Image (tube, rainbow, N blue to C red):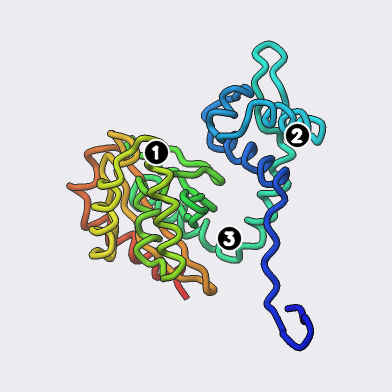
Amino acid sequence: MRTVGNIRHMSQPNRPVTALARGLRILETLSRAEGPMGNGQLARSTGLAPSTVSRLTDSLVQLGYLRINPTSGAYFLTPKNLRLGYPVLANMSIVGKGQRVLDDLSAETGVTAALAVRDEVHVAFVATARGRGVRAVRLAVGGRLPVAVSAAGLALMAQCAEPHRSRVLRQIRSDLIDRGADVTQFDDRLARAEQEHVVTTQGAWQDDIEGLAVSLQNNGDLYALTLVMKKGHLDPNRETLTQALTTAADTLSD
């Protein structure tokens, strides 16, 4: 707050430094990519001018956050980026206990179990345990999925309160439109999630993937506990999976 004459005014929040925001956009885009990306691909994905992308990738290479493939000219993230991620997990008190719960849950159900938080229009997995059964799906710590197609994301959005909820929904719908995805399908899935304690998705992320998720509160933060499996496993085992999932979530809730 600042004072002008006898009138006190609330200071306006500083806008993000443009170059920093754009550089982070490059890193975020590469973190979601399935492989290395060239400057042209990054420009199309970020909406930034090619000349801007070229300057940013050159700077990020010099700083050690990107490496370039000398043959293809494509860029990929370096291990230096892990310095930013691992401290985040280390400071989450739920992760240690959560990993033990996930290991037990995965062993009991035979499918993959994961603990997720919302990261803008995505969910990020902070702990995972892959089941030993043939229906298990591989998920990695730090991996992300769009909120709109994941049981975990829908469970989190169903519990998201206003006014934050409206802003996030606008972002999700805008992202879906940008990717040419069906917004109506997301709205239908969210409406169902708001009516269910345990959220299910079948074929929303990939045609052969099913998910089951429930939200929980721990230390004031909102998480989603989820089971992810191959198609055909959920319906015949729904009751058993739901009971195991909700029991595990109660263990993690405070």
Residue closest to the eye, 77 or 167: 167
Point out which mark residue 175 bears. none
Write the residue at 23% across / 52% down: 188
Residue drawn at point x = 60 percent, y = 24 percent: 36
Mark seen at residue 137: 1
Q: Judge left or right: residue 91 versus residue 245.
A: right
Whole-angstrom CA distance, mark 2 to mark 1, is: 33 Å
- Mark 2 vs mark 1: which is more N-terminal? 2
x%, y% of residue 194?
28, 64
Residue most extreme to the bottom? 6
Q: Quadrant of residue 193?
A: bottom left
The one nearer the camera, 228 or 166, is 166
> How far apart are the two marked residues, 3 and 1, measured between alpha carbons?
22 Å
Query: Which residue corresponds to mark 2?
Result: 60
**Label 1 crowd bin: few (<14), some (14–19), many (20+), radius 10 Å:** some
In the rendered image, which quarter is residue 93 located in? bottom right
